[in-house]
Image (tube, rainbow, N blue to C red):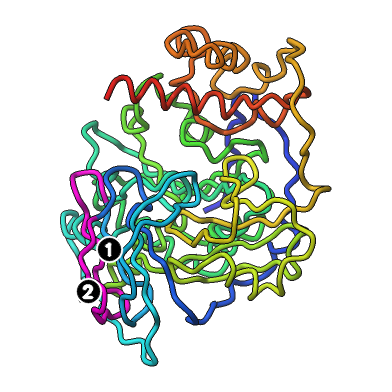
Amino acid sequence: MKAIKGRPFFRGVKLAGHKSPTEQLPAERLETAGEVAIPLRQHVGAPAEAAVAVGQTVKKGELIGRAAGTVSANVHASVAGEVRAVEERPDGRGGTCVHIVIAPGETQEEAYLPPLSDPTAEEICERIAAGGIVGMGGAGFPSHVKLRPSAKVDTLIINGAECEPYLTCDDVLMKHRREEIVRGAHYMAKALGVDNVVIAIERNKPAAIAAFEETDLAVVSLKKQYPMGAEKQLIYCCTGRKVPLGKLPADAGVIVQNAATAFAVCEAVELGKPLIERIVTVSGAGIAQPKNLLCPIGTPLSRLAEACGGVKDAVKFVAGGPMTGAALTGSDSVVTKTTGGFLFLTKEETNTDPPTNCINCGKCADVCPMKLMPMQTEFYTNAAEYENADKYGGVLSCIECGACSYICPARRPLAQAIKTAKENLRRKKA
């Protein structure tokens, strides 16, 4: 189906892509070697509860963490082997969570679920829940919950925007595993009871757009604009609908799922394979050989660096993209279900100058896609007046895209101030 042009959204920023080192590289499988450390919190909601003990032998795909509540997700062994530890470890984002540490065995016996043939809507949702599938392009919201919205929806959008610089994992998947993504999209559409399925791709991915024009999905080509991949902006660009403040995409009649999530759904339904591996972009001028790697969940960052020829002169390590990713303090981070990339950035790729006083230029407000006032948020957050940070800065409506911090000539930590205010407001309401 011939692609149609999507609308541009309000404000945002234009970013250099930095995608050329990996955008033409197919994903290489990183063979199992050494221990994996699989976190039980890789998703929005309650962490999974450990379902294995130290010394236990597990098969690849076996349940090792059981979903603990309505909004939670199962976790499975990404390799077959022996459980060496069930312990708290750093989660790579400033906190800790329980990790299941597995030493791979000589044989990699699988324990997948039986494939489904012509499944019902309920069977699809149940399989997605059993497979521990979550949104793989954002915060990791459990997909089975998302496919059971309280509001009536009529449209499913598959998000192939991948607007973060450096990352090409979704682009590679869309170019090489198109058919599985299409079938996964149709399974989710069946679960939702909708007929209108759209895949949205930025125009800097012409090969992916051309590939999907040969399918029965409606294709929307998107302007290269950050943060195009954010749900509210994507919905507007594809449908013209606006998600009301404080509401969810389903309230606008739309559900958004990532392209990698659609692929994972297809494998769960047709192969019985849970979400135990994903493509990760390893890039930046600080890594010897940038690559797209297909990695078991729980693979440590150090092993990815080794597979890419080692670290050169990187001064900053980032899990995810440079705009919304998390800066790492060491090499103990691991691949999770939501890890789209690891970046090894040099001094030339980062700005380590200290912040200076705000000059009241208003650039942060000019680029905010949610029409907020980030400088007001920082002012009230620094004064611990979090209610005013929301009243005057609109902090709870922030989508945390990082555009304000990117554009600020004074290098103010605006995005971090917003996160701090949101955390304090949510803690107060809890």
Residue matched to label 2: 113
- Hey, what amino acid is under mark 1? Gly
Q: Residue at x 49, y 62 (%)?
A: 335
Give, as a single range, the part of the protein colored magenta: 49-72
**Labelled pair 1, 2 in contact (Cβ < 8 Å):** yes
Q: For mark 2, does the 10 Å Cα neighbourhood hold few (<14), some (14 to 19), or many (20 or more) residues? A: some
The quarter of the picture where the C terminus appears is top left
Locate residue 173 relative to residue 112 in the image: left or right: right
Q: What is the chief secondary structure element of the magenta stretch?
A: loop
Residue 106 position by quadrant? bottom left
In reply to whether residue 277 is colored magenta, the answer given is no
Q: Give the image location of residue 428, x and y in percent.
A: 32, 20
Query: Helix or strand or loop: what does disc 2 sit on?
Result: loop
Q: Which mark is residue 131?
A: 1
Sequence-first tag of 1 and 2: 2
Residue 241 position by quadrant? top left
Determine the CA span between mark 1 and mark 2.
8 Å
**Residue 249 sits above or below residue 50 on the image:** above
Q: For mark 1, does the 10 Å Cα neighbourhood hold few (<14), some (14 to 19), or many (20 or more) residues? A: many
